[in-house]
Amino acid sequence: MSVDRSEGGGRFPDGRPEAEQPAWRRDFPIDAAQDAYVARRDYAKFLVLTSFGFVVGQFGIAVAGLRRALGRTPAREIARVDDVPPGGAAIFHYPGPDDPCLLVRAEDGSFLAYGQKCTHLSCAVVPHVDRGRIGCPCHEGAFDLATGRPLAGPPRRPLPLVKLEVRGGAVYALGVEERTT
Ligand code: FES
């Protein structure tokens, strides 16, 4: 097989004429100039598509952040007041079905709610209302019941705080505040 290189400026990569090329290169010729041109075009396509992917991803992150900042998580009833006596607790999921949270009712009757995933390694935390603590059984972490801030063990960040409103005999979750300190 031979390639007509009389037009288009096709050349072998080493610049020698076809007669001096090894047999394998003559049998499987590649037009080096054309090959480089296609590779550049493909590379440009790859860059454009990758950049577009990054732009779409950043846009999605920005929208999610904006929604969080604006507190657009929908309010939802999570419990009836009478169902959780002082000193009691209940589990609910908010804002999505994969987001377990803990509703606790202090001895004075007030409600508090936190994300139930420990901020160390995501074990489910357990309320100890009588001791004013929320404990994590995995590595003996402990959080302050009144604030959700870490008291002991490996956790360094507070539990996410679920904002609540009590009205009409029901407790509503209004949004989740992720905290770093
Ligand atoms: S996962 Fe909670 S203390 Fe480690």
Image (cartoon, grey):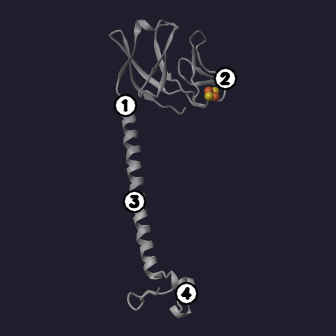
Q: Secondary structure at mark 2?
A: loop
Residue 14's disc is 4
Return the residue at label 2.
140
Q: Position of residue 29 (x, y in %)?
A: 49, 82
Residue 146's disc is none
Look at discs 1 and 2 and give the one toward the viewer: 2
Q: Secondary structure at mark 1?
A: loop
Q: Secondary structure at mark 4?
A: loop
Q: Amino acid at mark 1?
A: Gly
Q: Is residue 98 left or right of residue 127?
A: left
Q: Position of residue 59 (x, y in %)?
A: 37, 47
Mark 4 neighbour class, 10 Å CA radius: few under 14, some 14 to 19, many 20 or more? few
22 or 42, nearer to the observer: 22
First-in-chain label (2 vs 3)? 3
Look at discs 3 and 1 and give the one toward the viewer: 3
Q: Is residue 70 left or right of residue 22?
A: left
Mark 4–mark 3 Cα distance, whole angstroms, equals 33 Å
Return the residue at label 3.
49
Return the residue at label 1.
71
Look at discs 4 and 2 and give the one toward the viewer: 4
Q: Is residue 115 left or right of residue 64?
A: right
Look at discs 4 and 3 and give the one toward the viewer: 4
In the image, what residue occupies the spot 60% across and 31% down? 121
First-in-chain label (1 vs 2)? 1
